[in-house]
Image (cartoon, rainbow, N blue to C red):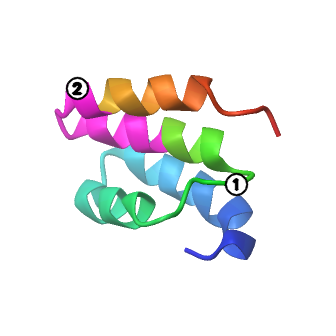
Amino acid sequence: MHSGNQATALPIYAALVEAGQLLEAVLADLQAVPQAANPHARQLLHILGDAYMKHGQIPAALQCYQSALHQPNP
């Protein structure tokens, strides 16, 4: 996912996670996105945390949520 497409793609990823669909693909895609200097890092980390939770990876989810809290608001 390129930075220009993130604003469009992140809500789609969130919907997939909410529905419990394609979790492994969502995890792979979101893990590959650089978070440094990313204006969407907070939202990305939150969705990634949700995907980890749905996938049963609670420690990884908590780490994402904590990281999201430390990101600046856009």
Q: Position of residue 58 (x, y in %)?
A: 23, 26
Whether residue 54 is in magenta: the answer is yes
Residue at 19%, 34% in the rendered image: 57
Residue 62 drawn above or below residue 39: above
For mark 1, give the secondary structure: loop
Whether residue 7 is in magenta: the answer is no
Q: Is 16 placed left or right of 10 in the picture?
A: left
Q: Assign the N terminus to one quadrant of the image.
A: bottom right
Q: Assign the C terminus to one quadrant of the image.
A: top right
- Number of disc labels: 2
| Majority secondary structure in the magenta region | helix
Q: Residues within 10 Å of mark 2 (few under 14, many from 20)?
A: some
Picture disc at residue 37: 1
Please tell me which of labels 1 and 2 falls first in the chain.
1
Residue 48 drawn above or below residue 71: below
Amino acid carrying label 2: it is Ile
Q: Residues within 10 Å of mark 1 (few under 14, many from 20)?
A: few
Residues at discs 1 and 2 in contact (Cβ within 8 Å):
no
Q: Is 8 placed left or right of 51 in the picture?
A: right
**CA distance for labels 1 and 2:** 26 Å
Question: Nearer the viewer's eye, disc 1 or disc 2?
Answer: 1
Residue 64 drawn above or below residue 37: above
Q: Quadrant of residue 32?
A: bottom left
Residue 24 drawn above or below residue 44: below
Residue denoted by label 2: 58
Picture disc at residue 21: none
Residue at the left extreme, as displayed: 56
Residue at 30%, 66% in the rendered image: 25
Amino acid carrying label 1: it is Ala
Q: Position of residue 34 (x, y in %)?
A: 53, 62
Range drawn in magenta:
47-60
